[in-house]
Image (cartoon, rainbow, N blue to C red):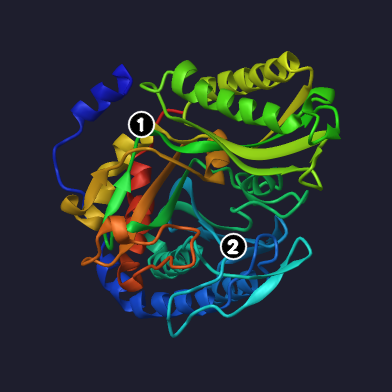
Amino acid sequence: MNYRLMILLAMLPVMAIAQPKDLEKNVAHIKDSVIAWRRQIHQHPELSNREFHTSAFIAAHLKKLGLEVQTGIAKTGVVAILKGGKPGPVIALRADIDALPVYERANLSFKSLDSADYLGQKVPVMHACGHDTHIAILLGTAEVLTAMKKDIPGTVKFIFQPAEEGPPGTEEGGAPLMIKEGVMDNPKVDAIFGLHINSQTPIGHIKYKSGSVMASSDWFTVKVKGKQSHGSQPWSGIDPVVVAAQIIQGFQTIVSRQSELTKAPVVITVGKIHSGVRSNIIPEELIMEGTIRTLDTKMQKDVHARMKLTAEKIAEASGATAELSIDTKTKVTYNNPSLVSAMLPSIEAAAGKQQVAEADWTTGAEDFSFYGDKAPAFFFFLGGMPLNQEPSKAAAHHTPDFYIDDSRLDVGIQVFCQLVFDYAGKSALVTK
């Protein structure tokens, strides 16, 4: 926290955050509808950049509210604008809308039985990361705020973003394309908030972190070229499989022996290897692919440089060559510290102070990170785990058994609305 912010915070009167009149009643009124919307969307999930029915459902509801609605942004994105009855800043609220190529194993009355084409292959489709809950929460927020329009200080921009999980193949998509097509402008956004449901946090609880909260996600490919030979005579060739094994080990020493892990975590994972056609032939080439996760931008660049040097020099030592390419999918998700400090009391007022706790950072990634380049951003987590569940036994995101208790989605609505009403009075405390 900077010195100026500390002084401003100290000058503020010590008082509870006031809840806008009728907010709690309006949220309670919409709660059952929000759960129903979530289950309808869950039963009919759609993959990234293919959210045609989902976006049509969203747009129809927003238009019914009388909002200014734009469709077709970043292929299937929807944006709605609500102009409040009082002057004030422009606040954006974001929800992602895509599902994953995962088979749903849970025995739910609204279980997904849908399938779709993914890169030429027929795959099952499931909301295995909870984006269905994000859609329902933001739709509910839009309805509640529309009913309270005259009391809102400023403008609210509701962003329903496709392809957070990553667009297929070489397509553009997600937050970068939304930004490229002007979602943070016209009107220009002063601050943006987002939430993510979490299957291992109790329902109704909020977790947050100031500064770096989620990792950057880089995908890498290493092409190792050796010399083909008979499997019985390895000395007559250069084995790219053995070279690749040494490179993988070398990558792990970047994590364990070359990275300052007390500063921030680093993860390097090789998830895919392809080489050879027969068991008795040493192949000429090997291709391996993986992911890099970092929570510090300087460390991210350092790891990239070390991986390149490691791969090339290990290959050179064996007479092979190695070519490394890295594609950055998301940046570090960074919560603006002054925005967190200013708005935390509002979150505590909406969710209950005992239900709000600071979290550790995570090596998961989110393309919400890109919005932070355009305006101060705050991304937090909402619990979706049944209260009697052990966190260690709750199924993780992106798995067939992923499960969300949707009985307290109203907490997400309550928090979003409180942030909208309170930000105007706190905006002077927020530094970019």
Q: Are marks 2 and 1 in contact (CB under 8 Å)?
A: no
Quadrant position of residue 390: bottom left
Q: Is 239 situated left or right of 307 in this image?
A: right
**Residue at figure coordinates x 72%, y 55% from the top left:** 168
- Secondary structure found at label 1: helix
**Total numbered circles:** 2
Quarter occupied by the N terminus: top left
* Amino acid, disc 2: Asp
Image vertical order of residue 319 relative to residue 424, above or below: above
**Residue at figure coordinates x 36%, y 45% from the top left:** 423
Q: Quick one: 345 or 103, which is closer to the camera? A: 103
Which residue does the numbered mark 2 point to in the structure image?
Answer: 98
In the rendered image, residue 254, in percent from the top left (x then y), is placed at: 52, 21
**Residue at figure coordinates x 55%, y 77% from the top left:** 64
Q: Is 20 situated left or right of 233 in this image?
A: left
Quadrant position of residue 208: top left
Q: Which mark is residue 338?
A: 1
* Amino acid, disc 1: Ser
Q: Which mark is residue 347?
A: none
Q: Quick one: 327 or 413, which is closer to the camera? A: 327
Q: Residue furthest left?
A: 14
Q: Is 101 situated left or right of 359 in this image?
A: right
Return the disc, 2 or 1, that comes first in the chain's sequence.
Answer: 2
In the rendered image, residue 80, in percent from the top left (x then y), is placed at: 57, 61
Q: Is residue 374 visible?
A: no
Image vertical order of residue 370 relative to residue 122, above or below: above
Q: Residue furthest bottom?
A: 109
In the rendered image, residue 393, in percent from the top left (x then y), is placed at: 31, 60
**Residue at figure coordinates x 25%, y 65% from the top left:** 389
In the rendered image, residue 313, in percent from the top left (x then y), is placed at: 69, 15
Q: Residues within 10 Å of mark 1 (few under 14, many from 20)?
A: many
